[in-house]
Structure formats: structure tokens, C-alpha cells
Image: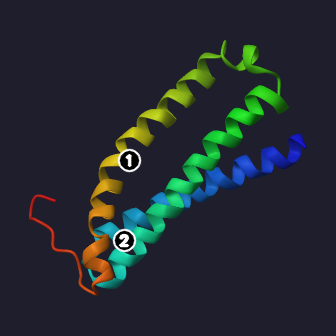
Amino acid sequence: MTTLFAFLHHLCAFTLVAAIAIEFALIRQELTLASARRLLATDMVYGIAAGALLVIGLLRVFFFEKGAAYYFHSHAFLLKLSLFVVVGLLSIIPTMEFLSWRRVVNAGQAPALDAKR
């Protein structure tokens, strides 16, 4: 069971990195209806992968690996978990922007952005 959760944890981590790379590539292109749809789908995959990564990681900490006492006394683990939470909180901003496009994209139009955005 430990191996299965390790595999799932790594699968989610690689999916998360791939989703971020795809988002960066899409956001640098001209924003069209197709790219907006891809961004919405990629951001959903990113969110699911991040949530699953956190849940599976915590399950590994509490039930499948060396135990919570070991991990929560490790500065490296605490730093990694803190950075994960900070990046997750920062990613709320673009996610909210992408979600605001839903109505326009579902109507078959490309979202319009300000020059600042």
C-alpha cells in the first residue's frame, strides 16, 4: 500500500508540473477562444492535481511512512509544505481570473483582457 501511495503522490506531482508548464505556454500566446478553453481545462487539472497531491501526501505522512512526528520535526519537510501552501494561495489569483471567463467562453467568445492583465 505504501508503494501505491508513493506512486500516486509522484503521479500527482508530475501532473501538477506539467499543468503549470502548459498554462505558462498558453498564457504567452494570443488569447483566443480555443486557448481560453484549454487554459480553463488545464487550470482544472492543476487544481485537481494539487488537491490530490496534498491529500495523498498527508495520508503518506500520517498513515504510510515514518509517521507525523518524524516529518513535522524535519525543517526540509516543513519548508516544502509551506512553499506548497504559499504557491497554492498565490495560484488562486489566476484561477479566479480564468473562472471569470467561463460565461464568455461558454457563449463562444474569446475573453477580452485589459492591457495591464
Q: Nearer the viewer, residue 6 or 52?
A: 52
In the rendered view, would you say 3 is above or below 117?
above
Label 1, residues with CA under 10 Å away: few <14, some 14-19, many ≥20? some
Q: Quadrant of residue 3?
A: top right
Q: Which residue is mark 2?
A: 26
Front: mark 2 or 1: 1
In the rendered view, would you say 84 is above or below 78?
below
Q: Which residue is mark 1?
A: 91
Horizontal relation, residue 9 to residue 63: left or right: left
Horizontal relation, residue 87 to residue 102: left or right: right
Report x, y in % for residue 87. 42, 40
Report x, y in % for residue 62. 76, 26
Secondary structure of the residue carrying tag 1 is: loop
In the rendered view, would you say 61 is above or below 110?
above
Report x, y in % for residue 49. 59, 54
Q: How many marks?
A: 2
Q: Image quadrant for the C terminus? A: bottom left
Secondary structure of the residue carrying tag 2 is: helix
Amino acid on which disc 2 is placed: Leu
Q: Image quadrant for the N terminus? A: top right
